[in-house]
Image: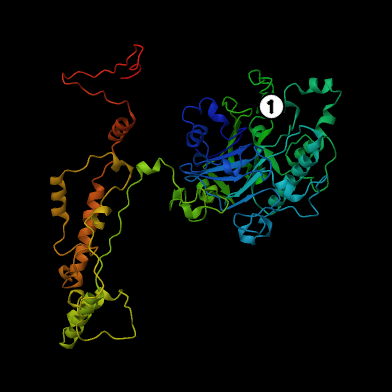
Amino acid sequence: MGLRITSWNVNGIRNPFGYQPWREKKSFEAMFDILEADIVVMQETKIQRKDLQDDMVLVPGWDVFFSLPRHKKGYAGVAIYTRNSACAPIRAEEGIIGVLCPPNSTTQFRDLPKDQKIGGYPQPEQLHLHGDIDELTLDSEGRCVILEFTAFVLIGTYSPANRDESRDDFRLSYMEALDVRVRNLVAMGKRVIVTGDLNVIRDIMDTANLPERLRKESMTTTDFFSAPSRHVFNQLLFDGNVVLAKDEYRENPVLWDLCRLFHPTREGMFTCWDTKKNTRPGNFGSRIDYVLCSDDMKDWIVDSNIQEGLMGSDHCPVFAVLNDTVRIDGEEVSIKDIMNPPGVFKDGIRLRDWSTKDLLPLSAKLIPEFDRRQNIKAMFFKKPTIPKIVPMISQDAVTSQVNDSEKSVESGSSTGTAESGSAYSTMPTSSPSKPPSSSLKRTTSMTAPSNKPQKKARAGPSRESSMKGQSNLMGFFRPKPTDSELKKSEEKNSPSTSDFDGIEDVESIQVPNGPETLKTDIDESKHDLTCADDEYVFDPIQAKESWSKLLGKRIVPKCEHGEDCISLVTKKPGMNRGKY
């Protein structure tokens, strides 16, 4: 199956979880699996940054990019989720004009270096804003997220609705800005996909009973489709219903309506219904959600349709599927190769896994509240890491080894010189300019006693024992080992010289006779730790029983006759009433 792009106006990012089949698991990961999508574009998320939760951002296996309203609360909002195993964008921006700034930056998107911006921004002579609308206002309502992949540029947008005349200037300004941005990107030679709730009806068959409604309002179809926003939109499409003369610079269409490309005569293919009037059961609605693509990638699409059977909003999902292999410049290329950064896939085979290094600055996972965080579910199944143990050798021991090697050189032992050089060639010295002294230094045990009282070693558990303790949350539910088991493990793991942390007295530390002995000890310790880690196997049944014992119903104690105890409460009026 190829790459699937799904667009859905959810009317509130948590709204679908009140309906089937989403209410069963109530997780975004399960929702995306049911949608069978690789890219999910949501509109009308209706949240602010303070409303973002872990389950929205830290979706396992997914990355997410938000465009949230700057001023209005619970309004608009666009989010694009991308499946890490299928695709990864190379650039991400917020807003249609490019006047917003990336996170932790004061430089607008359109002013970034050429290799860091997507391009195609409307120029002042191209953009004609109406009324008192300015560029910043147009981009501050959380209506657009733009992702660039190696294959194409994806524009996820939520166009303003036509509810009253007070928003006509904003609506028309936004549609014209979208038209200019798409045409500029196509002129640059980039493939473009535009998807989202555009709030525009493009033809008579895209809304229910249009002629009858127009007759009641004393309007003609020409008057209806000559409205400025519909006129601009139809000029953007191939086979668009353009009833008036085309505007300057809009003579040539650039996008295909994919649902109509695969279902050119299908009626009743509506995506939005009036929930207040409950018009969905009778399918009395309109088609205002689209997936559009540029002409140079029309042959890449193998299917496009609506999913009117999926409940959860006043809109239904709309999708398009790209083929597994596409033709570029006469050559067959795997879609995965061009939907990821260079070097991730080759001929459809993954060369390296996705990592946090692939995150873009606009990714919600880099928001300070979620950066370097993990889902709580991963805490139970993540493999425990082995702490790296580095042997601590005193400077006196190193000096003695160096002196021994110098003496071996003077005596003509070439073998000793080779071994000493190979073992300590990477060990840094404190003063490289001064040669080591030829006389042996005193060890710590031979130095003169200091006037300061020495600190007594604490009688508690050593550092080594704490390192061998709990490595994950399941350690709380395992039974504690008995004293005999502890003694056996101590006898098995206790080294013959001293432990690596140097907690014992310095007199008991014995420096290995050569580098090979030191290397062998380290290898043996690593082998023991590896074996201990391999012996751990996660048992889901045992984990379930452990949680049941902790959170389940309390076990009734037994009486002296071996029967279950019962609880009696005094009901007789008096001072003992209510007592057990």
- Front residue of this view, candidates 523 and 194: 523
Horizontally, residue 574 falls left or right of residue 264, namely: left
Q: How many marks?
A: 1
Dot 1 falls on a residue whose secondary structure is loop
Position in image of residue 89 (x %, y %): 55, 50
Residue 290 quadrant: top right
Where's residue 328, x and y in %?
58, 50
Relative placement, left or right, of 505 versus 251 is left
Q: Nearer the viewer, residue 230 or 296?
A: 230
Camera-nearest residue between 157 and 333: 157
Residue topped by disc 1: 265
Residue 269 as seen in the image, left or right of residue 521: right
Above or below for 564 versus 81: above
Q: Residue at x 34, y 11 (%)?
A: 572
Of residue 452 and residue 303, the one placed in the foreground of this image is: 452
Residue 398 higher or lower than 93, as above or below: below
Q: Residue furthest right?
A: 218
Q: Is residue 517 visible?
A: yes
Residue 509 at x, y = what percent? 17, 69
Tell me: residue 532, above or below residue 37: below
Q: Residue at x 43, y 51 (%)?
A: 353
